[in-house]
Image (cartoon, rainbow, N blue to C red):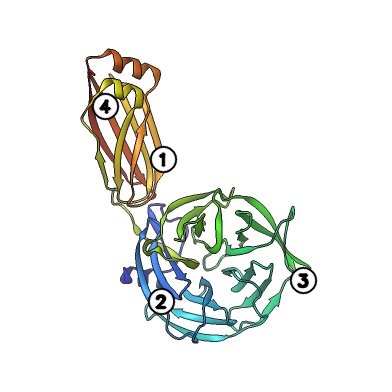
Amino acid sequence: MKRRILATLVAALSIGVPAAHAEQLAGVTDDNRLVFFDSGDPRAIDLRPPVAGLQPGELINGFDRRPATNQLYAMTDQNNIYVIDGLANTATLLRTFTPKLAGATFGFDFSAETDRIRVLSDSGQSFRLRATNLASASDGPVRLVGGGRPSMSGAAYSGNRVGSKSSRLYAINDQNDRLYRLTTSNKSGTNFESIGRLGVAIGPRTGFDIASDGLAYGAFQVGTDPSTQIYRVSLVNGAATKLGTLGGGLKLVGLTALGLGAPDTKAPGITVSISASQRSNVLAAKGLRVTLSTTEAGDLDAEAKLRGSQIGEAGEFVESRSSRVLKISFNSLGRAAIRRGSSVRIALRITVKDVAGNTTVVQRIVKARAG
C-alpha cells in the first residue's frame, strides 16, 4: 500500500476519470497517527505510528492536502501549522499563526482556487490563512440561514484540483446533522445555507473532504458507536451513504482525499449459505432466510422466481467484509403456489455490485418439500 500512496501523492490529479477508480483517502487520528485507506474498502488500512516532530502533548485538530503542492498540512491545538511527510511520518513546523483558535472541533480545508486555508470551528469562528506565510484574514462569525447553532466541525471546498477557477465551501454541522454551503463571507459574517440532512446522527469528531472528481467523503462518529464510519456525502441534498467502518476501531479527527487510485476491476466476493431443501409450510409463512458474506461494500439484490415468475425480492447496501442474514418474503401468488405444490423448485438469484460497478452473481435452487 505504501507504494500506491506515494504514487497517489505525487500524481497530477485530473477530472473525468471513470468511477471504477477508488478514491485514496488519508486521515489523522485523535492521537496523531496517520492512516491511509481507500473508499472501496475502509477496513483495509495502512496505520502509522504517531507523527514525529510535534511538541510534547500537542494534538492535531485539522488536516488537509494542499492542491498546489500535493503536500499534507496539519493544524494543531497550539496554533501551529505543520507540513506532514506521509512516507517518513514526520511533521515540519511551518509557523505559528493567529488568531488564537476558539473551539473544540474544527473544519480545515484548502481552497485550490485561492491557495488559502479556511478554518471554521464549533464555536462559530471563521478565518482564512495564506498558505505561503500564514497571514490571516478574519471573517465575521458563522451564521446559519434560518438560525441554529453554528457548530461547524468539518469543512471542504469543491473544485479541489490544480488550476480550479471556481470553488464553493461546504461544511458539516454536528449539532443538527446537516450539510451547509457558504453564501457570503466578510467581516460582518460567514453565512451558510442548508443543503440538506445527512440522514445520520453524528458526533463532533468529524472529517470531511471533497475529492478532485467532485465526490465528497465524510468520516463520522455515529450514535453511540465510538468507531469511525466512512460515508459518501451528496453535495446536492446532503444525504450520506455509508461505505463502511474504518478498520482498527480508529477515531479520526481529520480526512483528506489524495486522488484516484488504480482502477478497481476485481469482482466482489460473496458467500451464500442456504438450506437446499425446506418445508413448504415454513417457506410460505416465513420466506427464505439467506446467510451472506461479502468481501467489500456494495449493493445487494436478491430475487426469487417460481416457474419463471418473480415471487419475492430483497435489496440493501452492505458494508465491506460483512456477514448478514437476508430475508426474502414471498408475494401472495408465491405463497399459494408453494403451499399447493408437492415438489416446488424456487430459483434464487443474488447479485452484489461494488462501489466501482463490478458485479458478482450467485444462483441457487431451493426445493420446497411437503410438511
Badge 3 element: loop
Question: Label 1 to label 3, Cα distance in Å?
Answer: 47 Å
Closer to the N terminus: mark 2 or mark 1? 2
User: Can I make out residue 306 in this image?
Assistant: no
Looking at the rendered image, the quarter that the N terminus falls into is bottom left
Looking at the rendered image, the quarter that the C terminus falls into is top left
Reading the image, the residue beneath label 3 is 187
Q: Amino acid at mark 2?
A: Gly
Q: Residues within 10 Å of mark 2 (few under 14, many from 20)?
A: many
**Residue at 30%, 24% in the rendered image:** 282
Badge 2 element: loop
Q: Amino acid at mark 1?
A: Glu
Residue 331, image quadrant:
top left
Question: Label 2 to label 1, Cα distance in Å?
Answer: 36 Å
Reading the image, the residue beneath label 1 is 316
Reading the image, the residue beneath label 2 is 86
Reading the image, the residue beneath label 4 is 347
Closer to the N terminus: mark 4 or mark 2? 2
